[in-house]
Image: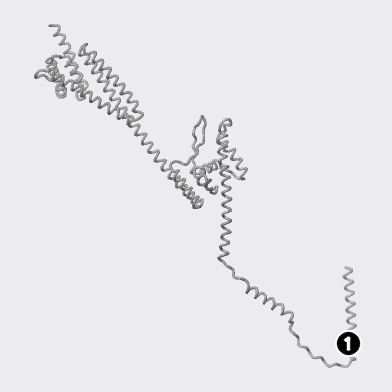
Amino acid sequence: MKNRMKAAVEQVATVEQVATVATVAAVAVATVEPVEPVATVEPVEPVATVEPVATVAAVAAVAVATVEPVDLKAATRRADALAHSAATEWRRGERAGAVAQLAAGRIAGEYVALATDVPLEMSREGAVQRVGGMLAAAAGAGINVNRAIAAHHSHRLLAAPDAPVLAYRYYRDAFGQLASRRVERRDGRNVDVWEIVPHVEVEACALYAEVLATGRDLAGALAGVRKILAVSADREGKEKMLASEAQRSVAEAAAAARTVAEEGAENARRKAEAVAQIAVASGADADKEASAAADADAKQAETDAQQAKKAQLTAALQSARLKDQSEQNEKRATSIRAKADAVGKAGAPAGAVTPAQMVRVGSISTAKDLAVSLFASIMANPSPEDVLLELMVLAASHSKVSDPIRRAAAAFGRAAKANVRSVADAA
């Protein structure tokens, strides 16, 4: 502050001195004679200030004239090349990361298999939760372990051994859906088995190869995966329907085979009973033959039952056996009818009725007429008991002879037996 005041005082003193000098000068001039005024000089333009501006403008003009025009196409190509290089490096980084992430999924699957096996015997849910926590800590975000394992198996099942990998998101979000896990029992423990969803392995491999070759984006890959899953579901439904129809057909065929076998066994049982009744009515001489026939029929019935059981396993084979058995029965009946016809033709005198004719007549005659005809035919034959036995067997086994006629024939046999004994006693 003092310095400022001092400077102000000094300035005032200086001004006073100047004023004094001016006053003295004025007095001196007034005492001097006047001098002629000097001519006024015209002002000159400052050339020094104009020169630098002109020089700079000239230099700028020369510089502009010497610069070459810019090539926009070359610059565009260069910029595009740089962008493509950046994208290539990014994809390279994604694929390198995909290799490591796929390996993490593989190792996670191996951990789950080891943790659920003896001696650890953890539950699968517990093993998945534990390894998932470790992966989340490493990634800084939640990790779906099952999807990570499925991503690894989708790459294993779809990719060629030496083919490059896609970005990990393709396996995690798209192709991992085509990997299906099923539990298989091996050596007393559950084992995870990974495979492509049923019925579409060819389509899945073709889609993966197309995405790898054309570089289709993730949205296109997801659309292709959804179509393949729809095809798989449709084919699976058709397969189940065909299997159900086949199972129903087999069951129906087996039931039909059982019915035929049971009917055959019942017919054999009835035939055996009829032969047994004939044996009783024919006397002691026919008892042995009837017993043998009954044993044969019983064995045949047992064979039929065994064949019926086998028919439950394969209906086609049983049907063939039943058809063959039916043909054998028809041949046996034909043989019996031929034998009866031969006996009747050989031993019957003129006017006597043969056994074969008797069967045909019996289907339209009354029991009384049949009994009269039978008596005439038997008594006219040199071996009446043989003719009687043949007639009884033929009547019992013939499919067109009704039960009343069979009962009438059996009654006649008992009456004929009593009549033969009474004639023998009288002689």
Q: In the image, residue 119 lies at what x, y percent?
A: 58, 30
* Left or right relative to 230: residue 310: left
Horizontally, residue 177 falls left or right of residue 416, namely right
Q: Nearer the viewer, residue 234 or 346?
A: 346
Q: Crowding at label 1, few (<14), some or many (≥20) Cα neighbours within 10 Å?
A: few
User: Image quadrant of residue 244?
Assistant: top left
From the image, which quarter does the N terminus lie in? bottom right
Looking at the image, residue 372 lies above or below residue 234: above
Toward the left, the furthest residue is 350
Q: Eyeballing the image, is 198 above or below 117?
A: below
Q: Where the C terminus falls, by quadrant?
A: top left
Q: Residue furthest front?
A: 162
Where is residue 271 shown, x and y percent of the image? 24, 20
- Percent position (x, y) of residue 383? 15, 14
How was this image coloured?
Answer: one colour
Vertical relation: 405 (above or below) 153: above
Query: Does residue 103 appear to the left or right of 376 in the view shown?
Result: right
Tell whether 290 sits left or right of 10. Answer: left
Residue displayed at 83% across by 93% down: 36
Give the camera-side residue of 105 and 243: 105
The image shows residue 149 at horizontal and vertical percentages of 54, 41
Disc 1 marks which residue?
26
Q: Measuring 55% from the left and 35% from the top, which residue is drawn there?
A: 113
Q: Which residue is drawn at 56% across and 62% down?
A: 77
| 111 vs 361: above or below | below
Q: Residue at x 76, y 88 (%)?
A: 42
Q: Is mark 1 on a helix, strand or loop?
A: helix
Q: Which amino acid does label 1 sit on?
A: Ala
